[in-house]
C-alpha cells in the first residue's frame, strides 16, 4: 500500500481503507525494536518479551501470506497433516474445499492486475465471513520461492485465484452446504466490491469449487488429499455451470475415486 503523500487519494471500488497485513506487521515490528532499544540493559525481562514477540511475528509471516492473512503453502503443510492424524484417530470427518474465481486471468489480462487483486480480496472476504474460526483458510501462491510442500507443513493457494478451506468436523455433504454458502456470499458482495467485473464480462462474479473428504484408506499423505481436491476443481472448471461444485468421492468397495458434479445439494451419480 502506497504511503500517503498528503494529497487526496482516490479510493478504488472495493479497495480497503485499512492498512494491509504487511504494513501492520512492519509497524508492529518497528514498535518492538524501538521498545528493545529504549529498554534499560538491566531490564532483561522486557527485552526477552520483545525478542520473543518478534520471533513469533516472523514465524507467522513465514506461514501466512500478507494479502489475506490466510495460510500460505508452508502454513497449510504444517496444519493439514496434524488435522488428518486427528481425523484418523477420532473418526471426526475432515473435508477440503478448493475455490477458483471465474475469469480471474481475464481480469488480470483485460483490465489490470490491480483489479485482479480486488477480485482476490472479495473472495477472501467472503470466505472469512462465512467460515468458522475452527476452519482453516489457505491461499496457495504458485510464485512463492519455496514451491515444494514439506512433509511436516500445511498449504494455501494452488493458483493465483485459488483458495483452500479445511473444514474440521464436516463430511463431504456438509462441505457442499458450506461451499454453497460461500458462493452465495461471493455473489452477494461482488456487485458492491468489484462492479467492474459485471461491466466487463456481462455476468456476475462466481466461484467454482472442488471438494474432497479425508479417507485414510486412500489419503496416505496430505499431498494426496490435496491432489484429490485439485482434481475435483479441475472438473468443476470444465463444466458449463458458472458456480459448479464437484466432489472427489472415494469408494471403499472398489478402492477407486470418482469425481461427481453436483446438482443443487445432490451428487449426480453416473448411470449404471
Image: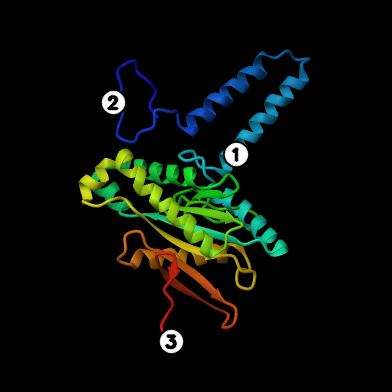
Q: Which residue is mark 3?
A: 272
From this viewpoint, is residue 184 visible? yes
Residue at x-position 64% and y-position 69%: 216
Q: Which residue is mark 2?
A: 10
What is the number of callouts on the image? Answer: 3
Residue at x-position 33% and y-position 55%: 102
Q: Which residue is mark 1?
A: 60
- Return the residue nearer the eye: 99 or 157: 99
- Return the residue nearer the eye: 131 or 123: 131
Between the C-alphas of marks 1 and 3, the distance is: 50 Å
Residue at x-position 62% and y-position 22%: 32
Instruction: Kindly check if marks 1 and 3 are in contact, taking CB atoms under 8 A apart as contact.
Output: no
Counting from the top left corner in percent of width and height, residue 185 is at 40, 47
- Return the residue nearer the eye: 240 or 36: 240
User: Tag 2 or tag 1, which sits nearer the N-term?
Assistant: 2
Image vertical order of residue 210 relative to residue 9, above or below: below
* SS for dot 1: helix
Amino acid at each position: 500500500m502506497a504511503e500517503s503523500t498528503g494529497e487526496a487519494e482516490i479510493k478504488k471500488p472495493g479497495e480497503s481503507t485499512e492498512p494491509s497485513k504487511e504494513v501492520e506487521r512492519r509497524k508492529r515490528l518497528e514498535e518492538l525494536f524501538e521498545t528493545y532499544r529504549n529498554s534499560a540493559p538491566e531490564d532483561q525481562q522486557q527485552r526477552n518479551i520483545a525478542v520473543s514477540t518478534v520471533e513469533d511475528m516472523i514465524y507467522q509471516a513465514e506461514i501466512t501470506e500478507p494479502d489475506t492473512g490466510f495460510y500460505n503453502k508452508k502454513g497449510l503443510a504444517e496444519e493439514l497433516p496434524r488435522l488428518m492424524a486427528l481425523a484418523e484417530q477420532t473418526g471426526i470427518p475432515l473435508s477440503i474445499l478448493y475455490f477458483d474465481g471465474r475469469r480471474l486471468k481475464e481480469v488480470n489480462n483485460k483490465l489490470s492486475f490491480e483489479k485482479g487483486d480486488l477480485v482476490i480480496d472479495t473472495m477472501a472476504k467472503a470466505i472469512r465471513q462465512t467460515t468458522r474460526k475452527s476452519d482453516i483458510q489457505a491461499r496457495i501462491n504458485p510464485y512463492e520461492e519455496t514451491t515444494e510442500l514439506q512433509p511436516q507443513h500445511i498449504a494455501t493457494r494452488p493458483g493465483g485465484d485459488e483458495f483452500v478451506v479445511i473444514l474440521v468436523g464436516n463430511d463431504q455433504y456438509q462441505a457442499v452446504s458450506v461451499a454453497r454458502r460461500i458462493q452465495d456470499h461471493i455473489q452477494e458482495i461482488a456487485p458492491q466490491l468489484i462492479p467492474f467485473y459485471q461491466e466487463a464480462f456481462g455476468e456476475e462474479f462466481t466461484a467454482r469449487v472442488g471438494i474432497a473428504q479425508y479417507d485414510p484408506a486412500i489419503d496416505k499423505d496430505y499431498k494426496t488429499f490435496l491432489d484429490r481436491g485439485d482434481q475435483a476443481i479441475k472438473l468443476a472448471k470444465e463444466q458449463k455451470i458458472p458456480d459448479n461444485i464437484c466432489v472427489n468421492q472415494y469408494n471403499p468397495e472398489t478402492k477407486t475415486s470418482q469425481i461427481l458434479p453436483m446438482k443443487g445439494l445432490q451428487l449426480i451419480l453416473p448411470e449404471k
